[in-house]
């Protein structure tokens, strides 16, 4: 059986948000709904500062908690691994939003339902690539079958030392220009609670709203992480 | 503060009068499940050209039930290769923007407009233009534009009218780069990003000021192992993408480049054969850079001498697949008084690498010879003798005839010398926010007898126009065909105009007819395109089917450059004639910040284009406002924390904006992204979001290039909330 998933090459990604918008257009989302998110981070002290972007979306977890809490069975896992929402069954109770450890679910206030990245099943069922993969100028996104040893995703996992996010359908190739700390990537899957903090680690690029709180968390967390390694120090932001 | 008298009601009335289609843009309700089933049935795909920025990538527009549902990259297009940036993907939100211009408007008071028919608008404008021409001569009319595909029509109008004053946006963007390369190389080369092995960008934010094709290529080069170096006072999008960030003191890039030239010559690392065969003036260049040691540059730039030497050696080792980006807007383009010298130094450094025409070096594009449309275009316009309004093309401005100095417009309107300027037509440009000193520009517009704005939206300039002529968006109109490499490409409508708008060509022809110049425009855009396409046995109709067709193109001849010597002019007498140096030489930036102020720097972001996308719902959701980047050490002294509201003040203006305290900026500078701070209330998403950088920039013209030198602005910053 297939197990569809994605590798994102952060050495290629330029943080352009093309994926976010192609996805919005594909699914006719409200402007504030982003299935695919682009976060920007900065680490270090001037003039030795590193930065980059991390892009995320629904991780299509192996054992999705969003599905478990859904009272109507609207959220389903397909045999090929895709976690989808049968939107007509969603009653908008929003339990799944709380259950999702990756903050991947998105409430559509006009339609009163919860949505998320569906890996563009309507496209892939027709043999096309997901909208985010197809539009990516940097070619930073790869989509394929983890169960097929010859697939592109497995190939990249091996040849580019990608980091597999355990319990999910995702892997990331870290940027090549610095030894990015693992904590900047989505954590391995765990039941809700423990992994929540990750959402505060990185702030959405360009968005002012998250600025203060998120930046403070980045600072404290990164200071801890990097002090252990003794290599980089996080910038102070106060 | 700008005057922003509430005008929403009047504007809404105007919208209602021309059609009840205003709600089209809101409320997508199609269910995803239903959509999947529908997708195959009844969808039309129209190949066209994106206009969410000036790059013009090829697109496939998916239209269902007369509605644009998605825009994708055209796989046949040489620039898009089937991929698009965020802005290209968001195009339908510009088409269905509920705040768009929906019909011609006439100003009836401060911020107040009423609908007017096209016939009346043309007639009234035509009468006024004829009257002003009669009173002051044809040169009293200035045409300002961000030159796009329709530019030949705009120029033809001005030639027919008899005015020399067609003026683009070059000094706010690229004029110093162009002047340098035009004189030294005979033209402005591009970079073979795809094959570069070592790439240096001085301020060129390749992954921030996005050009889709360049991104695709530089990522491919990175994948193949190219080293990428970003020299920038700020951790820009390219600085974090690159392998190495050189956090230089702003305005001093020139010193670093001169020192690299010094090292490469001194250590004999240059391509001697290339220099001997394809350049002139090497000995003069060598003598010119003799004192520019890495130690000297280290003092000026804040970058260690050993780093400078290492960069020079690494760059030279990778030659000829090593390139220093000629750049755009930014360090080599327009931002500093020394930008022209910087661009000249970049040109010289590239020449030493022998990279012109080499794989991974600098390249000139292949040229397609389009057909000649002039037989269609009426009588030959008479030669014009009046000098240009901005003095470009004469005296100390001899080298910038093609570029002009749009930013001087407000001063020139006041001066009336050597002749008065009384009328302006502005197409696809928002100089109130894209030139310097917004307030001065507004005052100038208020002083004129006739201001006509052609645009798709009520931008900050249109807000002060006497007449606003709404152009159809790129998804609703044709344009003159364009070429990229050996391809001809067509923009064509995906849907008919939603509102009472017209294509640029119709507007220009309508204006011409109304001021008695109809004989110059007795042809249609289709006839014009057919004339351009005739040599290839193509027509607009045929090209419309695929959108992109390959045609024969002429490869550039690198052995015969368009310079007096036919070679690269390392020593360039043309610059001496206008009062500059023979070879690139150090010039300090115009201003130097002290303890209590900052150098103000500005630039672009990946999700917006200039001031044109700030009412696009998808793009504004990604980045609704800009923030002032400030270094923690400076912020701490001023008691500023991230998220605080600060007042930024220069000698010409003040803005309020949120602070972003970040280690990613040189302590001497503060940075603000360009493209925010719209003060037109009817653009509801954009209105009053973030700050307008142009409010702060004094009107200047850099020597020789006439560039607007945006980053020669000093500001103070204080916390206000
Ligand atoms: S489209 Fe590609 S390059 Fe752009 S942010 Fe998304 S993954 Fe990164
Ligand atoms: S990431 Fe969240 S929404 Fe996606 S499958 Fe896992 S729990 Fe469900
Ligand atoms: S770079 Fe982006 S906005 Fe510009 S033309 Fe290409 S797709 Fe459109």
Image (cartoon, rainbow, N blue to C red):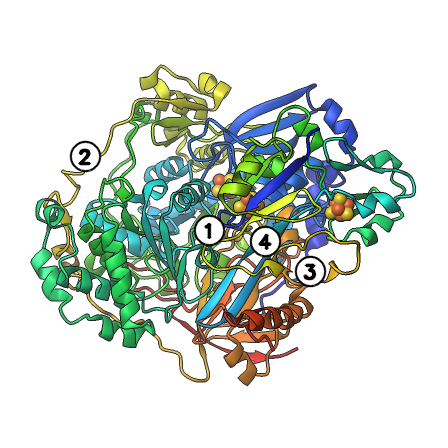
Point out residue B402 in the picture as x, y percentages from the top left corner. 29, 48
Q: Please tell me whether mark 1 sits on a helix, a strand or a loop.
A: loop
Label 2 crowd (10 A; few <14 / some 14-19 / many >=20): few
- Pick the residue in front: A189 or B155: A189
According to the picture, the residue beneath numbered tag 1 turns out to be B207
For label 4, being within 8 Å of ligand 1 is answered: no
Q: Residue at x 32, y 58 (%)?
A: B332
Label 4 crowd (10 A; few <14 / some 14-19 / many >=20): many
Residue B655 visible to the viewer: no
Give how far apart the Cα atoms at labels 1 and 3 are. Answer: 26 Å
Q: Residue at x 23, y 70 (%)?
A: B294
Residue B255 relative to residue A184: left or right: left
- Pick the residue in front: B263 or B482: B263
Residue B324 relative to residue B270: left or right: right
For label 2, being within 8 Å of ligand 3 is answered: no
According to the picture, the residue beneath numbered tag 3 turns out to be A198
Q: Are marks 2 and 3 in contact (CB under 8 Å)?
A: no
């Amino acid at each position: 059986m297939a197990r569809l998933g994605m590798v994102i090459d952060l050495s290629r990604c330029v943080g352009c948000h093309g994926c976010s918008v192609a996805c919005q257009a594909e699914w006719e989302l409200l402007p504030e709904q982003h299935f695919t998110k682009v976060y920007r981070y900065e680490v270090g002290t001037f003039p030795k500062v590193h930065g980059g972007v991390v892009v995320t979306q629904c991780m299509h977890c192996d054992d999705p908690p969003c599905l478990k809490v859904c009272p109507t069975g609207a959220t389903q896992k397909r045999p090929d691994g895709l976690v989808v929402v049968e939107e007509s069954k969603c009653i908008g109770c929003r339990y799944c939003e709380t259950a999702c450890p990756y903050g991947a679910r998105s409430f559509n206030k006009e339609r009163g339902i919860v949505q998320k990245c569906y890996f563009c099943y309507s496209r892939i069922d027709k043999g096309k690539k997901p909208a985010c993969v197809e539009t990516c100028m940097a070619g930073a996104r790869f989509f394929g079958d983890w169960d097929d040893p010859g697939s592109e995703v497995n190939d990249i996992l091996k040849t580019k030392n990608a980091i597999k996010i355990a319990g999910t359908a995702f892997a990331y190739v870290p940027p090549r220009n610095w030894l990015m700390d693992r904590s900047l990537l989505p954590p391995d899957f765990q039941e809700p609670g423990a992994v929540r903090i990750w959402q505060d680690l990185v702030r959405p690029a360009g968005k002012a709203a998250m600025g203060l709180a998120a930046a403070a968390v980045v600072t404290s967390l990164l200071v801890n992480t990097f002090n252990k390694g003794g290599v980089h120090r996080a910038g102070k932001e106060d | 503060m700008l005057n922003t008298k509430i005008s929403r009601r009047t504007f809404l009335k105007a919208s209602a009068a021309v059609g009840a289609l205003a709600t089209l843009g809101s409320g997508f309700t199609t269910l995803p499940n239903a959509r999947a089933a529908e997708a195959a049935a009844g969808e039309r795909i129209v190949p066209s050209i994106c206009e969410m920025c000036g790059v013009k990538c090829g697109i496939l527009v998916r239209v269902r039930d007369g509605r644009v549902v998605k825009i994708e990259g055209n796989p046949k297009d040489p620039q898009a290769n089937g991929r698009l940036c965020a802005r290209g993907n968001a195009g339908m939100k510009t088409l269905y923007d509920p705040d768009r211009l929906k019909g011609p408007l006439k100003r009836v008071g401060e911020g107040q407009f009423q609908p007017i028919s096209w016939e009346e608008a043309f007639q009234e404008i035509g009468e006024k233009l004829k009257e002003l021409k009669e009173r002051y001569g044809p040169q009293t009319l200035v045409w300002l534009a961000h030159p796009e595909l329709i530019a030949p029509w705009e120029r033809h109008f001005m030639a027919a009218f008899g005015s020399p004053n067609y003026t683009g946006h070059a000094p706010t963007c690229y004029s110093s780069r162009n002047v340098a390369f035009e004189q030294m190389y005979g033209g402005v080369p591009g970079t073979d990003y795809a094959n570069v092995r070592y790439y240096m960008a001085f301020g060129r934010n390749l992954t921030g000021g996005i050009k889709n094709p360049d991104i695709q290529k530089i990522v491919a080069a990175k994948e193949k192992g190219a080293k990428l170096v970003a020299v920038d006072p700020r951790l820009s999008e390219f600085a974090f993408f690159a392998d190495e960030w050189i956090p230089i003191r702003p305005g001093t890039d020139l010193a670093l480049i001169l020192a690299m030239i010094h090292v490469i010559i001194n250590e004999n690392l240059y391509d001697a054969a290339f220099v001997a065969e394809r350049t002139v003036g090497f000995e003069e260049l060598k003598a010119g850079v003799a004192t520019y040691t890495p130690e000297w540059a280290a003092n000026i730039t804040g970058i260690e001498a050993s780093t400078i030497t290492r960069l020079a050696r690494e760059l030279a080792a990778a030659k000829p697949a090593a390139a220093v980006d000629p750049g755009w807007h930014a360090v080599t383009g327009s931002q500093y008084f020394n930008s022209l010298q910087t661009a000249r130094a970049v040109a010289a450094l590239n020449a030493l690498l022998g990279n012109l025409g080499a794989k991974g070096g600098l390249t000139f594009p292949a040229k397609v010879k389009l057909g000649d449309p002039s037989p269609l275009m009426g009588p030959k316009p008479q030669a014009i003798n009046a000098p240009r309004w901005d003095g470009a093309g004469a005296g100390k401005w001899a080298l910038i005839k093609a570029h002009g100095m749009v930013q001087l417009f407000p001063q020139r309107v006041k001066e009336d010398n050597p002749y008065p300027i009384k009328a302006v037509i502005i197409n696809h440009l928002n100089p109130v926010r894209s030139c310097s000193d917004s307030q001065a520009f507004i005052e100038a517009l208020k002083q004129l007898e006739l201001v006509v704005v052609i645009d798709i939206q009520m931008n900050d300039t249109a807000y002060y126009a006497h007449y606003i002529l709404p152009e159809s968006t790129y998804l609703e109109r044709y344009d003159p065909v364009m070429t990229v490499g050996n391809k001809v490409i067509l923009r064509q409508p995906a849907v008919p105009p939603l509102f009472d708008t017209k294509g640029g060509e119709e507007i220009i022809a309508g204006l011409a007819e109304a001021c008695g110049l109809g004989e110059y425009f007795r042809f249609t855009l289709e006839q014009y395109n057919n004339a351009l396409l005739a040599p290839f046995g193509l027509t607009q109709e045929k090209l419309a089917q695929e959108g992109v067709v390959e045609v024969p193109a002429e490869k550039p001849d690198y052995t015969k450059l368009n310079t007096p010597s036919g070679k690269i002019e390392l020593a360039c007498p043309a610059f001496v004639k206008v009062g500059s140096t023979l070879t690139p030489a150090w010039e300090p930036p115009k201003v130097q910040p002290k303890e209590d102020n900052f150098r103000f720097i500005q630039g672009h972001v990946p999700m917006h284009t200039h001031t044109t996308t700030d009412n696009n719902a998808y793009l504004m959701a990604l980045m609704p406002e800009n923030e002032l980047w400030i270094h923690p050490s400076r912020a701490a002294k001023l008691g500023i924390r991230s998220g605080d509201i600060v007042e930024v003040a220069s000698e010409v203006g003040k803005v309020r904006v949120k602070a972003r305290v970040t280690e990613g900026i040189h302590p001497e500078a503060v940075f603000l992204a360009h493209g925010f701070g719209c003060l037109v209330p009817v653009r509801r998403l954009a209105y009053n979001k973030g700050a307008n950088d142009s409010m702060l920039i004094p009107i200047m013209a850099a020597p020789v290039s006439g560039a607007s030198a945006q980053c020669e602005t000093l500001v103070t910053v204080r916390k206000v909330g």
